[in-house]
Amino acid sequence: MRRISRRNFLATSSAAIGTLPLIRSTDLYAQPANPVFRHGVASGDPLADRVILWTRVTPKSPTGSQSVSWQIARDPKFARIVSRGELQTGAARDFTVKVDAMGLEPGTAYYYRFESLGARSAIGRTRTLPPSGVSRIRLGVVSCANLPQGYFNAYACLANRPDIDAVLHLGDYFYEYANERYGDGTKLGRIPSPNKEIIALQDYRERHAQYKADPDSQAIHRQHPFIVTWDDHEFANNSWWGGAENHNPEQGEGDWAIRRTAAAQAYYEWMPIREDAQTLTPRIYRTFRFGDLATLFMLDTRIVGRDRQVARDDMIGTDAPGRSLMGAAQEHWLAGELAESVRGAARWNLLGQQVMFAPQSEPGKPGGNPDSWDGYRAARDRMFDTIEQTKANNVCVLTGDVHSSWAWDLPRRPYGGYDAATGKGSLGVEFAGTSISSPSNLGTGPGGEQQLANLRAGRPHLRYVDGRYRGYFILDLTRERLQADYYAVATILDRSTNERFEKGFISESGRNHLTEASTPAAAAKGPDSAP
């Protein structure tokens, strides 16, 4: 058994912002079942030999430090403990706790718990990434959880699936608005806390705390490791490196750099993500290797390198060769990582990112949403160049943001040189998932069906689109094929785990082309759930 010293405790590198007093307005649930560990437990950033374990201690005093012990075991009864340790946390990181539990076996389920102030946390379950030779991977993919809009039933449904290897959260883990700004949570008792637009470090911490108090959020975190990236609402709507549409210095919201740093600090404190020297700047892009079956690249198309978006009809800006979503450093990094994945003979190359990648219109014409890759066409061309130059095959882009479900082939020029029947000319595929609870008007109302039909008719590479449900999708990978299965929850206005299979799409290895699946991929046998 190996003991982890306090040096393994991951103190935030942004603590120079200052230690603020712990001030909480009313949490989402006034009577937490566990008053010490009221925000649950979580795990994330799994590697083959380690994983991040997370919790938060609610202290008796808002100042000083607090001792926390932890254990990780091979079984949910903790008869086979493999590692344990003790560390300190405090107000400088909002009494959150992270352990990088190392020395683990690949492709293995583990169970973990914390103790502090005479209380014991709930038990969490996590998994390490598999070794080479793994034959199958199943990933849950989610995005866009808006608390006042409704319940997080999609989280509850995924928590009930023990065969998920990891959950990918593609951004908008929460929203920065006051109540009634983007949903009214009054009737459901889901009023954002603090009830204002969040700007300062303490505001972001409080909003994270409220979302972590949600029971469905706690359930999914307790059962599955998360691999996360942020989008704009963890900062402010339509963020870019130098500002945001929803940041107004002239209205007393201060300097963008201070707000951005505060949001990033709270994110690293409250999310189960690995912290190291990269957190001196808000860099979140990184690589995960699922043996030789898949390489996952988690990208940041929002904060580190995105140039300010232009108007939809600004074709000069849209096509400007110097504009970027990722920035030069990240583009260079991705090219090197993709080349390494190809050299390592990974079967699938997965890009987890925020905004729609597929081209939406013909060259020379205004595109779709200018906040997506359609507003940064030269950057998308450089991405296609990288795919071709590295000879990366079986590329699959995974997308959040749009509150609706889409499935695409990815030809560089979909309006010429692409065969929709065979997929010839496609360099990959893309799946965009609907939201956990954020709204969409796509396909709704009397003209909804015609709207969806028009979208398909005007985009030869679009295989599927629907915005009429909330939910998630599961990505199921084998050496022969990749399959994405879209699931809809029955409602978000009541707590429910009723769901239905909506659509499934398959890309056979080497084809880079989607065909519809008649049934969802069969569930696998998973390890015991956390109690």
Image: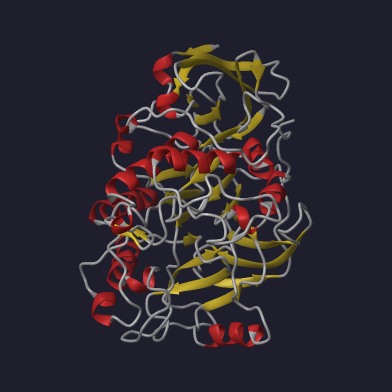
Which image quarter is the C terminus in?
A: top right
Residue at 65% across, 45% down: 164
Residue 475 appears in the picture as rendered: no
Where is residue 162 drawn, in percent x and y?
Answer: 71, 42
Residue at 58% across, 58% down: 480
Where is residue 230 drawn, in percent x and y?
Answer: 44, 50
Q: Nearer the viewer, residue 218 or 146?
A: 146
Asked whether, in this view, residue 99 is left or right of residue 258, the answer is right
Return the residue found at the far front: 251
- Number of numbered markers: 0
Residue at 72% across, 50% down: 157
Give the answer, above or below, for where 210 lies relative to 234.
above
Q: How is the image coloured?
A: secondary structure
Where is residue 459 drawn, in percent x and y?
Answer: 49, 83
Image-quadrant location for residue 449: bottom right
Residue 126 appears in the picture as rendered: yes
Where is residue 430 drawn, in percent x and y?
Answer: 50, 66
Which image quarter is the N terminus in?
A: top right
Give the answer, above or below, for where 59 lies relative to 202.
above
Asked whether, in this view, residue 281 is left or right of residue 171, the answer is left
Q: Nearer the viewer, residue 206 or 341?
A: 206
Image-quadrant location for residue 276: top left
